[in-house]
Image (cartoon, grey):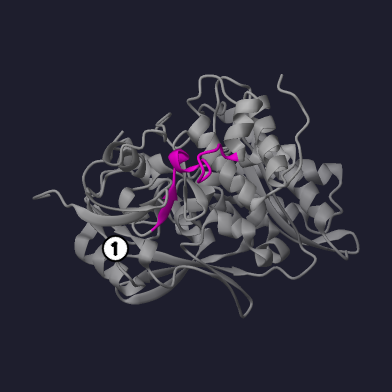
């Protein structure tokens, strides 16, 4: 290969249009973290298993460590930095993770939140089993998942205009 | 982990993609969902000099009814298979199998074409396609050809796909209504490749099996069509002795390697168990027998 190819890409990230030149081999997660400084999206296993790098792209959840930035050209991406409500209040999921103790070390949390956001658009009122199957691509080594499931149930209830009763353990 | 450098190409048509694969030669690879290729590139186990991104290629999308069957474009994702009402109604085995592949995020990007074309014996769809009697449409420099899924796989990552050829669609003959279908997969954890898995499609008349097709995943260097096991169940009402004989016939053709999922002996045994479970489930799903 004689010289390094760079390609222009235009993406909308958290509502703002950005244009950058990237090397084809640049992974989306590196583009987000290093080119755009959005370090809320984490690199965990780096092998497509753990889901810490999950972001929303055109309404779907993907693992940004297993996608090239050039493949995202033209798309609209939401990262955890874009999750809070426009007025700065926490998204129902963030509130749920806070109130239900859905995190301990917090490393998996951005990926969990972004996966759960899309899960609740695909299935606005999921059962516990559907939540567990829906977050099967996100690993947490602290919580045992119990409070993550509750946090998502809290958010689903709030988004459906109900109050989630169960207390955190 | 960062993949090695490569030059990126983004064709707009199948013809253009094939032209690129031909002119760039063996150091080029097509990129669809990338859920197998990108991890391999990050590990530097794959170091293609050129990637031909199929993301902008027209004609690789869509699940369409055609005379006698359905045609699934190579770039249709596992998530789209799961969401298809047509597939849920007529080919539920595809939905069952897709739901057992990886996890939601990977299924959002991973494609049917990639799953059947890359030749990984751990992939689930190849055995399902063999069970269904599917064929693959391969586009090359001199036009299209069709290859049966049952003939396509030669060894691990070694198939009848020639350099410069692109798998553009899978064509599946539709089983007539009333067939029972099942895919049973044993795995250590969600998202894992199969320790062993079995696909079964059968029909029955008056409580006896009339036709049967059985295929096995990840218990040999290629997917396996278990013809003898299928022959043994035809004409029976799937009694215990028949199930045992069919399991034994499947185990006899299994040739698994020992790996983190178990010893070769264990995995061969599990191939038999998965065949028995899938037979029972499929038989229970036969309608109007």
Q: Main secondary structure of the magenta part?
A: loop
Q: Percent from the top left, x then y, of residue B153?
A: 46, 54
> In this orientation, which residue lies closer to the viewer: B184 or A161?
A161
> In this orientation, which residue lies closer to the viewer: B104 or A89?
A89
Q: Percent from the top left, x then y, of residue B157?
A: 40, 48
Q: Percent from the top left, x then y, of residue A67?
A: 38, 47
Residue A144 lies in what quarter of the image? top right
For this orientation, the residue located farthest to the left is A2
Asked whether, in this view, residue B131 is left or right of residue A74, the answer is right
A137 up-or-down from B181: above or below: above
Q: Quadrant of the C terminus of chain A?
A: top right
For this orientation, the residue located farthest to the bottom is B67
Q: Percent from the top left, x then y, of residue B18?
A: 30, 68
Query: Tag 1, which secondary structure?
Result: loop
For this orientation, the residue located farthest to the front is A87
A107 up-or-down from B32: above or below: above
Residue B237 belongs to magenta span: no
Residue B47 lies in what quarter of the image? top left
Residue B150 visible? The answer is: yes
Q: Which residues are magenta?
A: A75-91
Question: Which residue is located at x 70 percent, y 44 percent?
Answer: B275
A148 up-or-down from A68: above or below: above
Asked whether, in this view, residue B131 is left or right of residue B8, the answer is right
> In this orientation, which residue lies closer to the viewer: B232 or B87?
B87
Question: Which residue is located at x 14 percent, y 48 percent?
Answer: A4
Residue pointed to by mark 1: B10
Question: Which residue is located at x 48 percent, y 68 percent?
Answer: B61
């Amino acid at each position: 290969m004689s010289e390094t190819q760079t390609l222009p890409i235009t993406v909308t990230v958290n509502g703002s249009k950005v244009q950058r030149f990237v090397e084809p081999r640049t992974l989306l997660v590196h583009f987000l973290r290093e080119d755009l400084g959005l370090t809320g999206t984490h690199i965990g296993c780096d092998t497509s298993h753990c889901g810490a790098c999950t972001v929303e792209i055109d309404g779907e959840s993907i693992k940004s460590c297993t996608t090239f930035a050039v493949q995202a050209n033209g798309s609209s991406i939401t990262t955890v930095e874009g999750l809070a409500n426009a007025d700065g209040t926490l998204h129902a999921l963030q509130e749920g993770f806070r109130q239900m103790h859905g995190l301990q070390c917090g490393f998996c949390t951005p990926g969990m939140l972004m996966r759960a956001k899309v899960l609740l658009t695909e299935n606005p009122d999921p059962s516990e089993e559907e939540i567990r199957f829906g977050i099967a691509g996100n690993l947490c080594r602290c919580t045992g998942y119990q409070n993550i499931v509750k946090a998502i149930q809290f958010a689903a209830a709030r988004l459906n205009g109900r109050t989630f009763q169960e207390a955190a353990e | 982990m960062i993949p090695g450098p490569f030059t990126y190409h983004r064709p707009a048509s199948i013809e253009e993609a094939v032209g690129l694969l031909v002119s760039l030669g063996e150091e080029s690879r097509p990129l669809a969902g990338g859920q197998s290729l990108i991890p391999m590139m990050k590990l530097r186990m794959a170091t293609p000099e050129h990637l031909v991104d199929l993301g902008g290629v027209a004609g690789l999308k869509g699940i369409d009814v055609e005379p006698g069957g359905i045609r699934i474009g190579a770039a249709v994702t596992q998530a789209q298979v799961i969401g298809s009402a047509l597939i849920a109604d007529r080919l539920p085995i595809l939905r069952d199998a897709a739901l057992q592949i990886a996890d939601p995020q990977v299924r959002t990007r991973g494609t049917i074409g990639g799953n059947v074309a890359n030749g990984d014996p751990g992939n689930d769809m190849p055995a399902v396609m063999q069970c269904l009697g599917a064929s693959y449409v391969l586009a090359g420099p001199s036009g299209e050809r069709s290859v049966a899924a049952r003939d396509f796989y030669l060894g691990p990552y070694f198939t009848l796909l020639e350099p410069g050829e692109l798998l553009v669609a899978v064509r599946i003959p539709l089983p007539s209504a009333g067939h029972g279908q099942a895919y049973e997969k044993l795995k250590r954890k969600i998202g894992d490749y199969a320790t062993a898995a079995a696909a079964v499609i059968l029909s029955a008349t008056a409580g006896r099996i009339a036709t049967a097709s059985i295929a096995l995943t990840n218990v040999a260097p290629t997917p396996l069509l278990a013809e003898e096991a299928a022959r043994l169940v035809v004409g029976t009402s799937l009694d215990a002795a028949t199930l045992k004989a069919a399991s034994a016939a499947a185990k006899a053709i299994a040739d698994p390697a020992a790996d983190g999922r178990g010893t070769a002996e264990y995995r061969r045994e599990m191939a038999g168990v998965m065949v028995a479970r899938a037979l029972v489930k499929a038989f229970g799903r036969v309608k109007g027998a």
